[in-house]
Image: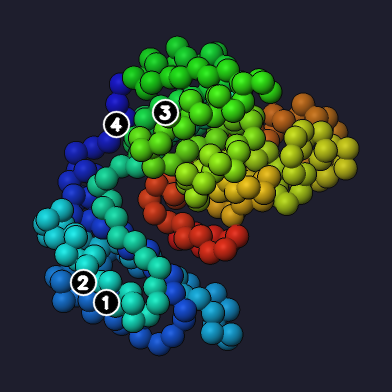
Amino acid sequence: MVPKITKQKNNALANRARMLVSCPDQPGIVAAVSRFLFDYGANIIQSDQYTMEPAQGGLFFIRIEFDLEDLDNRRQQLKADFSKIAEKFSMEWSITRASRKKRLAILVSKEDHCLLELLWHWQSGDLDAEIAMVISNHNEMRDLVESLGIPYHHIPVTADTKAEAERRHLELVKGNVDAIILARYMQIISPTFIEHFPNKIINIHHSFLPAFVGGKPYAQAHNRGVKIIGATAHYVTEELDGGPIIEQDVQRVSHRDNVDDLKRIGRHIERTVLAKAVNWHVEDRVIVHENKTVVFS
């Protein structure tokens, strides 16, 4: 089974590229980039920019979508020529083809709500990516996933087998996927594994970080008597639940809600927050700077 993506959408993206740029802020950046694309015959479809702390000579960020005739054959020369402008302004930059779908691996444990949300977005064509595989330390969701034509890999994890399980994970994903989604995958990822996918592993944490880091955050929240609970999608780093935040949301709760109520309310927040974050990542809408993100949503 394949997602219902229209032919019109594919045609619209055939010659479309996305440019992400971050550099020290100074006059002339937008003019230089726009002029470069104009001289190439490109048509800018969308442009978003942001300057961080402009009064202190901060950093400049820009995301541009543009159409360029015969993009596939001209993209390498385009990048080579743009590198001269990038050097002048000390840019970190990328140019990617919008028509190239990012390949995702989804890791999941027993709870299925985040996985189901991603699969629904994928089937409807709202998640413009390829789900290359689902990996789980449990076997409950195999039939569902395989019924959609997606490979399912069951790799049990115990304290004694964790290193071997992670080695098998790496064999499956290295060179085969562009990003990894932890859709309530209840295992800690090792620094060695993270090194292979910097800012390409997205986790959903079931609390409004930085509050209630680690395990059982709903129980922690209930014990604290909070009036708002939330969820946080972030890139995974060596610091537990401390990576750059992509998206968050909250909902009010009250003293009448027990831990199970908080979990039920939280599941809805988790699934929508993760879906947004994954969608923004695959559409090249996120720029990471140190431990923060600029998200052109």
Q: Which of marks 2 and 3 is nearer the N terminus?
A: 2
Q: Is residue 58 left or right of residue 90?
A: right
Q: Name the residue under label 3.
A: 172
Q: Mark 4 points at which residue?
A: 4
The answer to whether the residue labelled 2 contacts the one labelled 1, judged by CB atoms less than 8 Å apart, is yes
Q: Earlier in the sequence, mark 4 or mark 3?
A: 4
Q: Which of marks 2 and 4 is nearer the N terminus?
A: 4
| CA–CA distance in space, label 2 to label 3 | 36 Å
> Circle 2: is it few (<14), some (14-19), or many (20+) Cα within 10 Å?
few
Q: Position of residue 16 (x, y in %)?
A: 23, 56
> Eyeballing the image, is 112 above or below 6?
above
**Secondary-structure class at tag 4:** loop
Please, what is the three-letter code of the amino acid marked with disc 3? Leu
Q: Where is residue 161 in the image (x, y as percent from the top left)?
A: 62, 21
**Marker disc for residue 201:** none
Q: What residue is drawn where x is 68% and y is 38%? A: 206
> Eyeballing the image, is 150 above or below 126?
above
Say if residue 178 shows up in the picture: yes
**Between 156 and 241, the one nearer to me in the picture:** 156
Q: Mark 2 points at which residue?
A: 81
Image quarter of residue 272: top right
Please, what is the three-letter code of the amino acid marked with disc 4? Lys
